[in-house]
Amino acid sequence: MTVPTDDDLNARAARVLAGGATHVARSYRPAIHVERARGARKWLVDGRELVDYTMGHGALLLGHAHPAVVEAVDRQLHEGTHFGAGSRLEVEWAERIAAAVPSVDRVRFTSSGTEATMLALRLARAATGRDIVAKVAEHFHGWGDSVVAGLGPAGAPLLPSGVPGAVGETVLVLPSLAPEVVAAALRAGDVAALILEASGARFGWLPLPPEHVLEAARLCGEAGTLLVVDEVVTGFRVGRDGMQGRLGVRADLSAFAKVVAGGLPGGAVGGRADVMDLLAVPDDETGERFVSHPGTFNANPLSAAAGIAALDAIESLGARTRAEAFAAALEEAWGGEIAAAGLGGRVWRLSSIVHLSLDDPAADARLGIRMREEGVDCLRTSAFCSAVHGDADLERSVAALRRALPRSVSVGA
Ligand SMILES: Cc1ncc(COP(=O)(O)O)c(C=O)c1O
């Protein structure tokens, strides 16, 4: 078999894949093409080895191909991948989520984080009989019509291309989560849900004052608005009970994905029994507020097996603590490199996620690309650390940043 080069695959991808890629965040040029991954590393088609911090867009807290997950998925593969019926696995998976997160009475599985936030908002609208949902500018909740408002750069239209203008009448984009902003938005009593990343936009890239989240929860309670906490990235990563546990806030509904599905496709909504029970098919199927929720691959056995194995291994291995300890070391080391380079920039961290930013926007835009060229693959310039990143990864990551920094500052370097 002839192994294609990255150049060859880029040319073929440009012809056959829309936009040459399969995700907007992977649409950089030249794209890389990964052949295999294990632990904290991945290998490209040309054999190049990268320290990986994209980590399945944050899904892989245990690293690539963790033996516990591989074994569970392999076993399930032989037992069947779709039963067209309920399974023991979906019950056991849901029990783990409900046991970990106090605000979750019941769970409904979806196939992705986007589907989870879409379902949470539909449930909130059905439960309250209100159409409007509020979200915070720059907070990311996937690509459903209701949540993509307010994501563009300053001055961009409220809604991206392809979303009907009428959607704008049902979405309120709050410029911030400041208490006076939230209070004003909820005053009329017509908002079904306030959805937010309790970590602040982009998993803590723009951190929020914790008291703003707590006050938003209180104001929601007063206004009869459901608080939807998006735990797609933070769930089971920043704590067993997610960001809501760290902050001491109680969500009405939560959206999960990524870590919860152990690196396979999957998501979930969890929350208050009275709201979640709108998913229960009424006896006569005419229940006024019944929310019908299909989805061929909801709780598919492979994802359920991976999710259960990952959630168990995370607890038994102390994976969060390990990942956080590594992230703290990386934060310190990268911070030292930026200071030593005499460049304006910042390194900060939410739990096991390290964020990196240079003050000069042009250099900042090049940094992720240069880092990749130097052997370290971040999600833009954010690093998802795992329980299996170790000293050798740290060493390589520091050396890569040292080489990438000057090359980011000067054009064409
Ligand atoms: C906070 C948050 N919510 C929702 C989503 C959407 O999840 P998915 O990509 O599984 O649709 C993402 C994806 O990165 C996310 O970061």
Image (cartoon, rainbow, N blue to C red):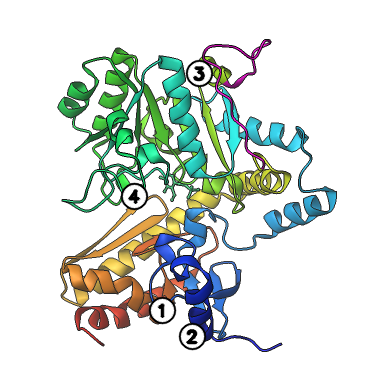
- Give the CA separation, mark 4 to mark 1: 24 Å
Amino acid of disc 4: Arg
Dot 2 alpha-carbon crowd within 10 angstroms: few under 14, some 14 to 19, many 20 or more: some
Q: Are marks 2 and 4 in contact (CB under 8 Å)?
A: no
Query: Which residue is labeled 3 in the image?
Result: 275
Query: Which residue is labeled 4 in the image?
Result: 202
- Give the CA separation, mark 1 to mark 2: 8 Å
**Which one is in front, 317 or 403?**
403
Query: Which residue is labeled 2 in the image?
Result: 7
Label 4 beta carbon within 8 A of ligand 1: yes
Earlier-in-chain disc, 4 versus 3: 4
Q: Are marks 1 and 2 in contact (CB under 8 Å)?
A: yes
Mark 1 secondary-structure assignment: loop
Earlier-in-chain disc, 1 versus 2: 2
Mark 2 secondary-structure assignment: helix
Start-end of magenta stretch: 279-296
